[in-house]
Image: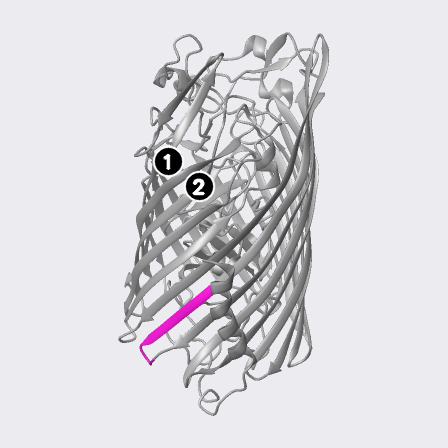
Amino acid sequence: MSVRRAAIPTAVLALFVASPLSATAQEAVTLEELSVTGEGGAGRVGAPPPSRGFGVAAPPNGSSLVIDRPVGQVVTEIDRRNTIANRPATSIGSVLVNSPGVTVRQGNGARDVIVSIRGNNARSTGVIKNMVVLEDGFILTQPDGASRFDLTDPRAYSRIDVFRGPQSALFGNYATGGAIAFRTRTGREIDGYEIGTDAGSFGYLSNYFTVGGVSGPVEISLFASDVRGNGYQDHSSYDTQTINLLASYTPTPDNRFTLKVINNDLHANLAARSSLAQYRINPYQLGCAAAATAAPGCTLTNFFVNGAFGRTVPVTASEASFQRNDRRTVVALRYEHDLDAYTTWRTQLGFDERNFDQPFYATSSTGSYPSWNFLTDLTRRGDLFGLPAVGYVALAYNTIDNRIATNTRAPYGGPRLGALIGDQTAVQDNLGGRARLELALSDRWTAVAGISAESTRITGRNIAYTYSAAGIARTVADADRSFLNTAPELALVYRPDDQWQFRGRVATGYTTPAASNLFVTPAGLPGNNTQLKTQENLGFDLGLDWTPLPGVSVSLTGFYEFFRNELVSQSPGAGLATYFFNAPASEHRGIELGVNWAFAPGWLATAAYGYNDQIYTDYVEQLSAGALTRRFDRAGNRIPGVPANQLLARVGYDVPTGPLAGLGAFVETVVQDDFFIDNANLLKAPGYAVVNANVHYDTALTGGYAKRLNLYVEVRNLFDTTYIASAQNLANSISATTGRQNGTASLFTTTGSIYAGAPRTFVGGMRLAF
C-alpha cells in the first residue's frame, strides 16, 4: 500500500479522535471487558470500562486503552493459575506453552528460552525475533528487533497476553509473527509482601521477594529474585538476579504517572552444542571436562593455538570456558492524561541497554546496545456516523546505537580472547505512525480497521580482520539502508449471542533486517551481508470462540500467511555465527485450538494445540565449495526448524470445599513433532512427548503474621525421556571435488546444533504471604 493511500484512513481516524462526542456516544462508548481465559478480543463496543489499564490499576473512572484489549485480535490470555501461582515456573517457556501456536526451545544458558508464534521464530537459537514484547505497556523489544527472556522471571507476572499473527498495524516493526504482552502484579493485587523459595535437582535454587500496596495516590509493586543452578550438562551452571519495579502516582483522577524499572544480571556457563550423532551417544555432554580424556560423544571446538591463525587445537566447553555475561537495564516513564471522560492521551519514554560479554564457541562478542523508545498516543471513545466507536492514533520513534567487537578465542586459561576479527558500529532509527478504529456496526457486528507506516534507517560500518603469516588483511563493509513499510489491517467480529463469536481478519506485518544481520556472511564470519531486504507477511485468519457454559470455552483459528523475502537464519558450522538470508516467497498455514473444560466440581482440563505447515514457494539456494558453485531449487521444501504439531494437555483437580480445600494436583504433557533442520530436508530432529506432574496446597493462615501459605512439588519429565530441547538449523554443503550436495551423513555429524532437554527433574517450593 502506498503512503498516500494509507494516509486516507489515517486522516479519517484522526478527525474522529479530534471530534466532539455526540449525545449517542455518551450512553455507551467503551470496550467490553473479556474473560481472563478468553481469546479473540471483544466483539462489541459498549460495555462498562474495565477497572484497570495496561498493567497499572486505574482509578474507578479511568478509561481503558484500546491497546489493552483490542477487538478482533487472535489473543490468548494466560493467567497465573496452573502456570505460575502453584508450581515452580523455572522459566517463562513453561508458561507460554499454554497458548496455542506457541513453540518453546531452550536458548543459550540459564532460563533463556526461544519462543516462536506460529513458527516465526522457531529457527532462532539466540535472541527473539519476529515478535514485539511488551511489559506493562512498555516496549521490551529493542529497536533492532531483538528481545530476550533472561530478564523475565515468571514469578513477577499476573497475566500474559499472546497476540498471534501479523501485528505491525498495532505494534510496528518486527511484529510479523505476533506480540507478547506481560502484566506484572500491581500493588493492590499484592497488598502486602511475599517471600518464596524453590529448590530442586541439579542444584536449582530460586529465592524471591514481592512487596506491593497502595497509599493514597501512590501504588508500588517490587519483585526481586536470585536464581542459580548447576545445570544438567557439563559446564552449564548459572546464576541470575532480577529486579522488577512498577510504580504509579495519581495526583488527580485525570492524571497518572507510571514508572517501570527492570534490571537483570546473568552469568551462565554454556555447554557445547552437539551433532545429532553426538547427541545419540552422549546427550547431556557428560565427561567432557578435557579433550584429552573426553568421553565418547563430547563436542570439541577447534581454536587457533595463537588465537589468530594457523595450527588449531580441539577444546571442550569447560577448557574454553564458554560463557554469557549479560546485563539488561530498562528505565521507562509514562504520563497519562484524561482530556475528558472519553479521551485519554499517553506519552512514554524508555531507556533500554543490553550489555553483553559472550565468549562462547569459536568467537567472542562484547558490546553495548543502548536504545531509546518514545511513544505518544491518543484514545477516543465516541461515535462515528452515529455508531459507537473507539479510535486510536499514535506516533512512535526509537533508536539504538550498536557497538560490538568480535574476537577469535584462545585455548585454555579461562575465557581468553584471541585476535580481533570484527569491529562493528551502527545506528538504527525507526519512526512511524499508527491508527486504529473499532466500530460497532450493530449489537452483533464490530468492524476494525488499522494501519501503520514506518521509516527505518540503518547506518553502520563493520571492519573485518583476517590473519596469516604474511600479516593482517582489513576489509570494510559499510551500510546505509533505508526502508519504508506500511501495514494495513481489517477485522470483522460477529456475536450472534453470548455463547458464540465469529471473527475474520486480514493483516500485514514487516520486519527490517537488524544492523547485526547485515554484517555476518554466509561463512559465519564478520563481513558484508548488506543486501538483505525487508521481510513482509500478509496473513488471513478465520476463527470462532464458543463459551456454552461458565466452565467451558473453545477457541479455534485457521490461518494462512504469505511471506515475501522471509528472513531465515542458519549456522554454517560449529563455532561460527548464525547468518541470515532472504527466501523470496514462502507460505505458512495452520490451525490453533484452545480448550478449557471444567467438567466436574474442582476438575479442569486444558488443551492448547497448534498445527503449522510452512514451505518455501520460491527459493533457490546457492552453495559453494572451493572453486565450485551450485544452485538448488528449494521450492516445495519445508522451512527448517518448525514442528508441524505442538500440544499441551493438562488435567487437574483442586479440592473445592471441606478440610482439604486448597489441595490440588495436575498432570500435563507437552508433545512436539519432529522437524527438518536443513533447507534440503535431509535431516530431522526427532519429536518428543514429556509428562509433568504437580501436587500443590494453598491455604489461608490465621492467628499469626502470615496471611497465606502456598506449597508445591513438581516432577518434570516424569518418565525421564531423552529429547532435543533445541536444534540450530544447519547449512547444506557440496563436495569441493564433484559439486554434488553432501548427504544426510554429513549433516548427521555436523556439530554446533543440538541441546538435549532436561532429564527427570524434581522441584519443590513454598511461598508465604504477609
Quadrant where the N terminus lies? bottom left
**Residue at 52%, 21% in the rendered image:** 574
Residue 393 visible from this viewpoint: yes
Q: Is residue 463 above or below residue 55?
A: above
The rendered magenta stretch, by its main secondary structure, is classed as strand
Is the C-beta separation of discs 1 and 2 under 8 Å? yes
Judge by depth and name the residue closer to the eye, 124 or 671.
124
In the image, residue 80 lies at what x, y percent?
A: 47, 58
**CA distance separating discs 1 and 2:** 10 Å
Colouring: one colour
Judge by depth and name the residue closer to the eye, 679 or 414.
679
Q: Amino acid at mark 2?
A: Glu
Image-based side of 757 in relation to 422, left or right: left
Residue numbers of the magenta segment: 442-450
**Residue at 42%, 84% in the rendered image:** 385
In the image, residue 211 lies at what x, y percent?
A: 65, 61
- Give me the disc on residue 566: 2
Quadrant where the C terminus lies? bottom right
Which residue in the structure is indicated by mark 1?
639
Res 37 quadrant in image: bottom left
Q: Secondary structure beneath disc 1?
A: loop
* Crowd around label 2: few <14 · some 14–19 · many ≥20 (10 Å): many
**Residue at 36%, 25% in the rendered image:** 632
Q: Is residue 736 above or below residue 200?
A: above
Q: Amino acid at mark 1?
A: Ile
Residue 415 visible from this viewpoint: no
Q: Secondary structure beneath disc 2?
A: strand
In the image, residue 619 lies at what x, y percent?
A: 38, 33
